[in-house]
């Protein structure tokens, strides 16, 4: 009785003292970092030493960049880790088919025992599920669907890394060429300015021609600085995505096999990783709905047990055997859970509806992005042809204006400056359209699930997993 009184008195102890400070409501980044650092010894947010010490090649092409990215990028490693974890979750659920054996030490007060009612014991028990109306099988299917979703997420992370690295490299290509054109434009305008200064010194033209030409040169120099800044920005972005300290130069080459991919007939989009992940989510939702329905049905199990008492207080008879054993056929089912099982079924049903909508949305977005990229490709291809003709005409116009300005004196300097800039503007436009077209090819590949095949990643081992077509 004293033991029972002590336990009952403990129930009256307050679980929470009003007025004590709640640490969860006080947030400090420095304190958080300090506590987490003590739990993560040796971890650093910087790239690994061997990654930072390796240098980018002097000339990087898109194939080399993709190869480096998929074998290094931590986003893929994260997805692979989640896949391996989910694979073990299947083993966790399957283990419920096998006997569950447990053992331990038990000590406490029982009014039916002799003496002071205290009789400690060792207990060994087991339970073998015989039939549960699909509880375990639906949990296994849910875990298997979760693994399929994680497999799709690995493919999605590979595609996203490939796509983002490809985009960054194409932007470096773009601004390398734009900067080169801007340099040539500044040089061309400087030539015109020198011509204006020479003619002004000889009294053949006014001072206004010199001022006007120098203003154009200053504008061209400003454009050079803008393109240089953009180039450095995208070089830094590309270097970070590849885990290198810096990227110096990239090749202008682009694979011929994908140079006009958007013009081809669209392939089946059901193999797009985002769509595969949505299908797996739907399968998982169906398994959870089946599991929720099975929870209200009985579970039949066979439960043997063995108990060994450490004193004789456990019995009132003359039997001195301290070891007892038994085996029982148990049938358990929930009778009343406050509506929890019904709510669980409704929640699983709504989750299935949400998964259906997510699947339709993933399909819609994939088709939409692919169709938009294809439409833009057709339009930009036509613009390239127009720009090529415009460039040729601009060169002819400039040569004619030079002749009229120098030999005949019938052409003002302003026309000469405009014609020089018109030539380079057509080159700027042409380079931007070419870069946009290449970006669109990557978009078409990404939204048709063909990006890995285009860069030769199928049939390869990537960060510990084998990727097959």
Image (spheres, grey):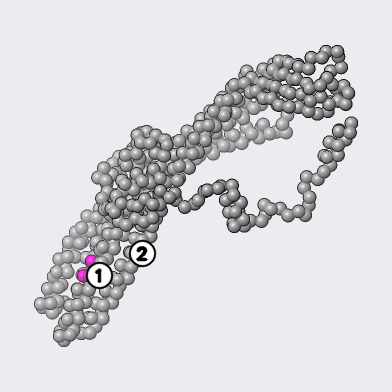
From the image, which quarter does the N terminus lie in? top right
SS state under label 2: helix
Helix, strand or loop: magenta stretch: helix
Identity of the residue furthest to the top in this view: 319
Q: What percent of the width, then of the height, locates residue 299?
A: 66, 21
Q: Over which residues does the magenta segment extend?
A: 184-188
Q: Which numbered disc, 2 or 1, marks the residue closer to the eye?
A: 2
Mark 2 is surrounded, within 10 Å at the Cα level, by few (under 14), some (14 to 19) or many (20 or more) other residues, namely some
Query: As displayed, is residue 1 above or below residue 421?
Result: above
The structure residue drawn at horizontal position 88% and vertical position 35%, both measured from the top left corner, is 5
Report the Cα–Cα distance between label 2 and label 1: 17 Å
Label 1: how many Cα within 10 Å (few below 14, some 14–19, many 20+)? many
Asked if residue 370 can be seen in this view, the reply is no
Identify whether 356 is placed above or below 205. Answer: above
Q: Splitting the image into 4 quarters, where does residue 407 fall?
A: bottom left
Residue, x 28% and y 44% (percent of image)?
258
**Residue visible at 84% across and 21% down?**
313
């Amino acid at each position: 009785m004293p033991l029972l009184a002590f336990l009952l008195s403990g129930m009256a102890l307050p679980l929470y003292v009003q007025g004590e400070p709640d640490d969860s409501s006080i947030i400090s980044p420095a304190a958080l970092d300090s506590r987490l650092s003590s739990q993560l010894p040796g971890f650093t947010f910087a790239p690994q030493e061997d990654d930072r010490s390796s240098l980018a090649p002097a000339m990087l092409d898109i194939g080399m960049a993709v190869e480096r990215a998929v074998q290094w990028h931590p986003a893929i490693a994260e997805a692979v880790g989640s896949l391996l974890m989910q694979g073990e979750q299947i083993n966790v659920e399957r283990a419920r088919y096998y006997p569950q054996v447990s053992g331990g030490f038990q000590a406490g007060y029982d009014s039916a025992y002799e003496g002071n009612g205290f009789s400690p014991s060792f207990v060994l028990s087991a339970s073998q599920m015989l039939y549960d109306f699909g509880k375990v099988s639906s949990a296994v299917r849910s875990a298997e669907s979760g693994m399929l979703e994680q497999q799709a997420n690995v493919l999605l992370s590979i595609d996203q890394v490939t796509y983002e690295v490809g985009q960054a490299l194409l932007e470096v290509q773009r601004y390398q060429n734009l900067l080169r054109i801007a340099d040539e434009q500044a040089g061309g305008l400087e030539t015109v300015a020198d011509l204006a200064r020479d003619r002004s010194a000889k009294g053949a033209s006014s001072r206004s021609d010199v001022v006007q030409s120098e203003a154009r040169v200053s504008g061209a120099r400003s454009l050079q600085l803008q393109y240089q800044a953009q180039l450095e920005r995208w070089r830094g972005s590309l270097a970070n995505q590849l885990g290198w300290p810096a990227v110096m130069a990239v090749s202008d080459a682009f694979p011929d096999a994908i140079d006009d991919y958007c013009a081809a007939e669209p392939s089946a989009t059901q193999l797009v990783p985002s769509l595969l992940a949505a299908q797996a989510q739907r399968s998982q939702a169906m398994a959870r709905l089946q599991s929720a329905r099975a929870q209200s049905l009985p579970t039949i199990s066979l439960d043997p047990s063995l108990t060994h008492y450490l004193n004789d207080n456990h019995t009132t008879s003359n039997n001195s055997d301290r070891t007892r054993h038994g085996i029982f056929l148990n049938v358990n089912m929930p009778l009343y859970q406050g509506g929890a099982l019904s709510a669980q079924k409704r929640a699983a049903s709504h989750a299935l509806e949400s998964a259906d909508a997510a699947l339709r949305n993933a399909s819609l977005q994939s088709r939409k992005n692919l169709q938009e990229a294809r439409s833009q490709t057709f339009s930009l291809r036509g613009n390239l042809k127009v720009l090529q003709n415009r460039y040729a005409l601009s060169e002819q116009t400039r040569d004619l204006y030079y002749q009229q300005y120098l030999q005949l004196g019938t052409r003002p300097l302003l026309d000469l400056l405009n014609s020089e800039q018109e030539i380079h503007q057509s080159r700027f436009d042409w380079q931007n359209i070419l870069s946009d077209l290449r970006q669109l090819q990557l978009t078409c590949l990404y939204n048709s699930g063909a990006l890995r095949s285009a860069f030769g990643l199928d049939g390869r081992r990537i960060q510990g997993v084998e990727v097959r077509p």
